[in-house]
Structures are given as C-alpha cells and as structure tokens.
C-alpha cells in the first residue's frame, strides 16, 4: 500500500474527497512513480544538450525540435523530391499523375505516404529540404504493380502506370497496407 498523503491508508475515499484523492493518485502514477526514469532521461539528454540551451525553449518548441512538423506541404514535397530514372512516359505522365494524387491526399494520407517511404510520419524541422537523405522517387522497372519503398534511403519506387486511377488505387493500397513495416 502506498500512502499518497501521511496517514492516507486510514482515510476513506468519500464523495467529498474523491477529487483530491484522484489528483493525488494521478500525481503519484504520472510523476512520482516514474521520477527515477525521468531523472535518468534528463541526465542523458543534458549530456547531449546542455540544460542552459534547453531552457530557452518552451514545451511546444521542444516538441517541434524533437518530433518535427506534423503538417506536410505538397508544394514543399514537390520542390525537394528528387526524381531518378524513368522513361519519357514516366517523367511526363506518371509523375504528373503522382503529384495530382498526392495533392488530393488528406494530411493523414500524406503522413502515411511519408511513413511508408521514410519510416517516419513526420518531417524534421525545415520540412523536405532538411530530410536526409533527400526524398527520392525512383522509376521502378515494373508495370502496374504496387509501389515499394526503401525507408533507410527515403526512396519511393514507383512503377509505370497506364492511368491516374490505377496509380491512385495502388498508391493508396500501398500506403494503407504497407506503412507498418514488419509489423513489430
């Protein structure tokens, strides 16, 4: 039994004191119970980034620095994606369809595409320009098959398609069913 306040084991929880009890319980479970782990995490973090440098950021800025941006801008994506290989049909038709499909995606679908290709559903601060290695769209030597990806290299291998509809259908299938990696 853990006493949340001195003599707490002897105090009954009533309707009048239940909110006080719940606040104490939340404080214990969310802070006190993990204090050692948090202290070790902070010690390790401070070895990498001195505390005086961390102190200049508020919690929102730290989240952005650590997690990146959640908003995916298609124009930024298009401006910084590197297209590798491909026939004239691939470069002129398939890529036009690809950008049209991507432009129609919701933010959730864009995040799934990013997850499928890079292993992360969020971009680093600075967007696609700071993604390392650069996002590459590789002309795959296949036709009308599912796109594949090499997450270690931020590469989307895009086959040749005969229509916008075919590309749309297979890209959506790939990012919805193939964005979980090995399912670990």
Image: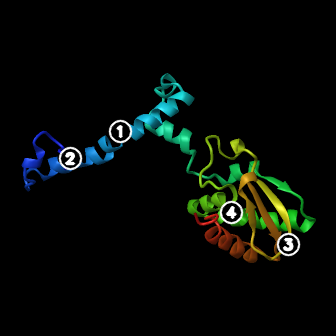
For the residues bearing labels 4 and 2, Cβ distance under 8 angstroms: no
Q: How crowded is mark 3: few (under 14 residues within 10 Å), some or many (20 or more)?
A: few
Callout in the foreground (1, 4): 1
Q: Mark 3 points at which residue?
A: 142
- The reply to whether the C-beta atoms of the residues labelled 2 and 3 are less than 8 Å apart is no
Mark 4 residue element = helix
Q: Which of marks 4 and 2 is in front?
A: 2
Q: Residue 2 carries which label?
A: 2
Query: Which of the two discs, 2 and 1, labels the residue nearer the N terminus?
Result: 2
Residue pictured at 60% horizontal, 58% vertical: 111
Of labels 1 and 3, the one closer to you? 1
Question: Quadrant where the C terminus lies?
Answer: bottom right
Helix, strand or loop at disc 1?
A: helix
Instruction: List the single residue furthest toward the top.
Output: 52
Q: Distance between the residues labelled 4 and 3?
A: 21 Å
* Residue at 44% in and 35% down: 40
Q: Mark 4 points at which residue?
A: 102
Q: Number of numbered discs present?
A: 4
Which is more foreground, mark 2 or mark 1?
2
Q: How far apart are marks 2 and 1 (CA)?
A: 15 Å
Q: Is residue 50 above or below residue 42?
A: above
In this view, the mark in front (2 or 3): 2
- The residue identified by callout 1 is 35
């Amino acid at each position: 039994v853990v006493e949340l306040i001195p003599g707490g084991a002897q105090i009954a929880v009533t309707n009048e004191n239940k909110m006080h009890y719940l606040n104490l319980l939340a404080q214990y479970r969310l802070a006190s119970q993990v204090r050692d782990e948090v202290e070790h995490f902070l010690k390790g973090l401070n070895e990498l980034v001195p505390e005086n440098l961390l102190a200049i950021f508020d919690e929102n800025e730290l989240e952005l620095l650590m997690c990146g941006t959640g908003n995916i801008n298609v124009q930024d994506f298009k401006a910084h994606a590197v297209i590798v290989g491909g026939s004239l049909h691939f470069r002129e038709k398939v890529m036009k369809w690809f950008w049209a499909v991507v432009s129609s995606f919701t933010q959730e679908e864009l995040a799934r595409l990013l997850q499928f290709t890079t292993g992360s559903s969020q971009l680093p601060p600075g967007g696609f320009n700071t993604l390392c290695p650069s996002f590459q769209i590789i002309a795959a030597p296949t036709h009308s098959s599912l796109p594949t990806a090499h997450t270690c290299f931020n590469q989307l291998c895009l086959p040749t398609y005969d229509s916008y509809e075919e590309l749309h259908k297979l890209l959506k299938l790939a990012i919805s069913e193939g964005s979980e990696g090995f399912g670990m």
